[in-house]
Image: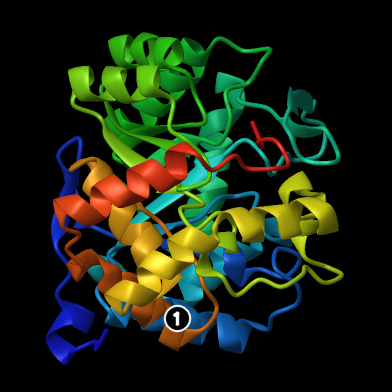
């Protein structure tokens, strides 16, 4: 597929509960060391600017990406002069100040659990720290990263609503929640977007999707390329790569998954697009309110990924993909 200058800059726009963003955003987690191996800030900044130059307006980060606020700080530095060109979404509850009690949240990573704290008494402090790191006066979309198992989600949402009233936050988001949790939170304050894992190798929770539709909430799809697997370019994960904690990437599961997704890569080859472009285009065709946030460290790959917003899949191709994916069992469990 040839990427034209027009395609590289003018991405279609989608709505997240009234917040307009590019149809494909950019997941910035990959730009911090310790995620997909080592990376320096100069390379990370080039990647981030390539995404913005290619038309991505939704930049997704978290206070817990990288050590001591690294990811937010990188974004603030790189986009300092271009703040009004982007919608900055960040998440809270992972970067716990000294003395804040960690609350274990079970996950499917090899280490078994994450530590969070979304007690409302800490939320303003989290937001103020993120605002400092990002070098901005407002957060466009603010999510509790995971629901705190020891704190009612409605209480956490109430604290974010206070930040919205104060003008520090523009829109409320939720991340990694159930349909029931979404409904409960939305009753406290309107939710603009719910972030959930969704890709060719992770089915969306249909009840969550139905609740989002009913409430007018947008969907932000994290890991839309299956942590890079769906690009077809991941042979193995090296030391320092976070994917070592993902059972789907251990040697046996990885090989089995590669074999099972070969027909999908074959369809991409027939269409003259990359496997990553097919995975992203497929996801965009699933729902008009979904905004995937692929991440990459390579400007050329970033431009290729974002060009997927212009790929149109015929009904026949979509039917073929549905048939293939319905028969494709992924080895290695899920993360949540």
Question: The N terminus appears in which quarter of the rendering?
Answer: bottom left
Horizontally, residue 312 falls left or right of residue 201, namely left
Q: Pick whichever, 195 or 202, lies toward us.
A: 202
Residue ID at (35%, 81%)? 303
The picture quadrant where one finds residue 278 is bottom left
Query: Which residue does the numbered mark 1 point to in the structure image?
Result: 301
SS of the residue under disc 1: helix
Q: Pick whichever, 190 or 125, lies toward us.
A: 190
x, y percentage for residue 232? 56, 70
Q: Pick whichever, 101 or 42, lies toward us.
A: 42
Horizontally, residue 76 falls left or right of residue 16, namely right
x, y percentage for residue 334? 65, 36
Horizontally, residue 66 falls left or right of residue 185, namely right
The picture quadrant where one finds residue 112 is top right
Residue ID at (21%, 24%)? 213
x, y percentage for residue 242? 75, 58
On screen, residue 328 above or below 270: above
């Amino acid at each position: 597929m040839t990427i034209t200058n027009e395609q590289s800059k003018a991405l279609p726009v989608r709505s997240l509960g009234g917040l307009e963003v590019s149809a494909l955003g950019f997941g910035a987690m990959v730009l911090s060391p310790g995620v997909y191996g080592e990376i320096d800030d100069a390379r990370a900044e080039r990647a981030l600017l390539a995404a913005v130059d290619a038309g991505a307006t939704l930049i997704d980060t978290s206070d817990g990406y990288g050590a001591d606020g690294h990811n937010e700080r990188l974004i603030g530095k790189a986009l300092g002069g271009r703040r009004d060109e982007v919608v900055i979404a960040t998440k809270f509850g992972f970067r716990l100040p000294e003395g804040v009690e960690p609350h274990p949240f079970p996950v499917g990573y090899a280490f078994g659990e994450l530590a969070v704290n979304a007690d409302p008494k800490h939320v303003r402090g989290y937001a103020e720290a993120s605002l400092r790191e990002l070098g901005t006066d407002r957060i466009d979309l603010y999510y509790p990263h995971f629901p705190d198992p020891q704190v009612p989600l409605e209480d956490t949402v109430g604290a974010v609503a206070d930040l919205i009233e104060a003008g520090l936050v523009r829109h409320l988001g939720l991340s990694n929640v159930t349909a029931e949790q979404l409904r409960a939170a939305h009753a406290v304050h309107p939710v603009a977007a719910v972030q959930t894992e969704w890709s060719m190798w992770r089915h969306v929770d249909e009840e969550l999707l139905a609740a989002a539709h009913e409430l007018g909430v947008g969907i932000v799809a994290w890991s839309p390329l299956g942590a890079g697997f769906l690009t077809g370019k991941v042979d193995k994960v090296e030391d320092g790569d976070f994917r070592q904690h993902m059972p789907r990437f251990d040697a046996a599961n990885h090989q089995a998954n590669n074999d099972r997704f070969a027909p999908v890569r074959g369809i991409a080859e027939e269409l003259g697009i990359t496997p990553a472009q097919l995975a992203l285009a497929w996801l965009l065709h699933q729902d008009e309110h979904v905004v995937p946030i692929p991440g990459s460290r390579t400007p050329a790959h970033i431009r290729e990924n974002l060009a997927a917003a212009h790929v149109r899949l015929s009904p026949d191709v979509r039917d073929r993909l549905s048939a293939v994916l319905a028969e494709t069992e992924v080895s290695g469990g899920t993360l949540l």
